[in-house]
Amino acid sequence: MTRPFALSSLLLAAACASPPAASPPPAAATPASFTGTRWVGAGADPGNRNAPALEFVTEGRLAGYTGCNLMSGAWRIEAGELRIGRLVTTKRMCVGPESEVEQRVLAVLVESARFTREGDRLVATTPQGARYEFLRAR
């Protein structure tokens, strides 16, 4: 009769054991996590003054460069995610490679874009699948 007792003791011990600790949820973005940061287009030379760039100047204020024109606008954290508002840009005529870069950058910097941090990268993705990556400038 020792076996049923041992089995019931084992089952009772398992039932009383604490469940395994769940891994913590990913940290939600906060305004402080972006304020004062600068990001440069991935693949661009950070020293290149024509590289696309985003700078979260203050809480709620964004400035940057498209690769051809200056831009500015608003940003916010909504439900733990970075969101940008409508951007305004200067209207300098762009031709050649700068024009192509600007088109790619502006295609993703839209209000419907989703921003995620992947290591040292800030990735903007639109619902249509356009994607552009920025690297944290040091």
Image (cartoon, rainbow, N blue to C red):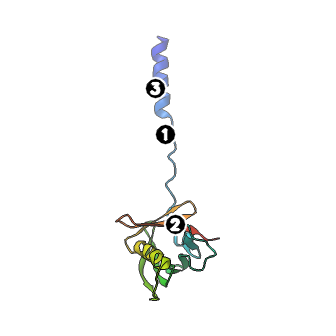
Numbered tag placed on residue 19 in the rendering:
1
State the residue lying farthest toward the top. Answer: 1
Which quarter of the figure has residue 36? bottom right
Q: Is mark 1 on a helix, strand or loop?
A: loop
| Disc 2 to disc 1: CB gap under 8 Å | no
Which quarter of the figure has residue 129?
bottom left
Identified at 60% across, 80% down, the residue is 49
Amino acid at pointer 2: Leu
Looking at the image, is 118 positioned above or below residue 14?
below
Residue in the picture at 51% in, 40% down: 20
**Nearer the viewer's eye, disc 2 or disc 1?**
2
Q: How many labels does the image show?
A: 3
Residue annotated with mark 3: 11
Q: Locate residue 68, reporting x and y percent.
A: 50, 82
Left or right: 53 in relation to 106:
right
Q: Label 3 neighbourhood size at 10 Å, few (<14), some (14-19), many (20+)?
A: few
Q: Give the camera-side residue of 50 and 61.
A: 50
Query: What element does badge 3 sit on?
Result: helix
Q: Residue at x 58, y 63 (%)?
A: 120
Q: Which of marks 2 and 1 is nearer the N terminus?
A: 1
* SS for dot 2: strand
Q: Toward which corner of the image does residue 119 lie, by quadrant?
A: bottom right
- Under mark 1, the amino acid is Pro
User: Which mark is first along the chain, 3 or 2?
Assistant: 3
Residue 122: mark: 2
The x, y position of residue 125, in whole percent, is 42, 66
